[in-house]
Image: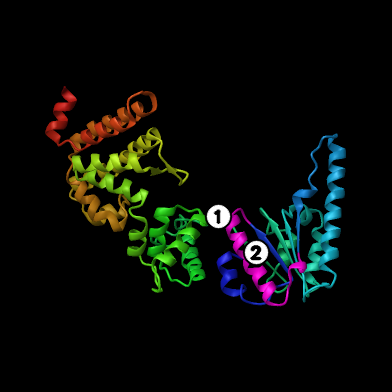
Amino acid sequence: MKLTDFVHKHSKTNNLPVYILSGNEYFLKKQVLTGIKKQFFLEGGVKEGLIEFNGKDTGSNFTVNQTEGNAIQNVKVSALFNDVFDEVRTAPMFGKHKLIIVENAEGLLVKYQERISEYIKNPFSINCMIFEVLSIDKRTKVAKTMNGKQGILIECDKLFDRPAPWETKKPEYDSELTKWVVMHARNYDKTVNLKSAFCLLERTGNNLAIIDRQLDALSIFVGDRNEISIEDIQLFSGESHREKLFNLLDEIGMKNTISAVKMAENIFNTGLENERKSITFDPRSIAITIVISSHKRMKDLWKIIRVLDKGGGKEEVLEKRYAPRPFVDKMIKQARNFKEEEMSGKWKHMLEADLLCKTSRLSPTLIVEQLIIKLCMWPRNELNSITS
């Protein structure tokens, strides 16, 4: 079960006897655990009834031979299993019930799959037990036993920040991550629509902890108003790093040389989002990103130029997927600023700039500025530049 389904269907009901949390998104796991703990205390649980184990404590450092190391590890896993199930099968001394949490529980679920499956079918329902694992095979007996009646398997994997490749008709802002933002904003008593959520992600990246802090700050920023709008996000955080790059590419496409050079200088001064979605201030990394992005934009414009030169129009550009629908008019307008015969020269300039960024000691800022000037040249100047 996905986290969103759990929040909608089960998070506000009584705690079930068994939960398994799987996945590599620890913020989501923390969110689920916080919700279950909150419900546990609301229903009469006390601090003494919250018992936590960690499967990492069963690991062997293998300072002895491999056989002995495995034997030691098996003893420790067995001891952990006995400790966990002694707790879960006994009534609490304090409070109405116990909450037993086992982190890094992969070893238990593998070694004691049969016994854990039997327990899930007939649990000691006064208490609640949670297994946290990085991953679990849904074909295993334990996973199949988690049918939602006595236990739930909650998947806390990384959320997609774009629609899945097969969801071609969905807009860019309709993703797992934007839906989570919409849902999470309710924790701050605010509403956010998908487009506003996407605008926020443009500024924060896909780190859930950072998004959470921004939502917290925005909830204070908007005050008594219920909705956080795109305007609020823009006013609060300014222009996003991604927007800065797109705006630079637009100015190059319109051949606005002075404006494009100023935007490039601003990017070098304020940083740029890299491929790992963190902000980099390294001039060489920024220059390479700008050159690569310019290459992609010019390649798309060249394709559109050829469609237009053959008498094609907007619908053919969309059909060939040379431009996304929201940007197709803008891209066609930019393509009309270029001629087929000048594009090979632009290509040469971009290849030279890419090589200079990676091998030259020249200033990356200077390399990018020179490239912008050459890309924004009009055909007659371009021809003179090539022949000279």
Give the side of residue 381 with respect to residue 203, left or right: left
Which quadrant of the view contains residue 365?
top left
Give the side of residue 151 with respect to residue 60, left or right: left
Q: Position of residue 179 (x, y in %)?
A: 47, 65
In three-dimensional space, the C-alpha distance between marks 1 and 2, rounded to whole angstroms, equals 17 Å
Query: Mark 1 against mark 2, which lies toward the viewer?
Result: 2
Q: Secondary structure at mark 1?
A: loop
Which quadrant of the view contains residue 108?
bottom right
For residue 67, above or below residue 53: above
* Residue 318 sits inside the magenta stretch: no
**Tag 1: residue type?**
Lys
Q: Can the viewer see residue 172? A: no
Q: Which residues are magenta?
A: 23-50
In the picture, which quadrant includes the N terminus? bottom right
For residue 165, above or below residue 282: below
Q: Earlier in the sequence, mark 1 or mark 2?
A: 2
Give the side of residue 295 with respect to residue 131, left or right: left
Give the labeled residue for mark 2: 33
Which quadrant of the view contains residue 319?
bottom left
**Tag 2: residue type?**
Leu
Q: Position of residue 167 (x, y in %)?
A: 44, 60
Q: Secondary structure at mark 2?
A: helix
Give the labeled residue for mark 1: 158
Between 44 and 144, the residue placed more toward the observer is: 44
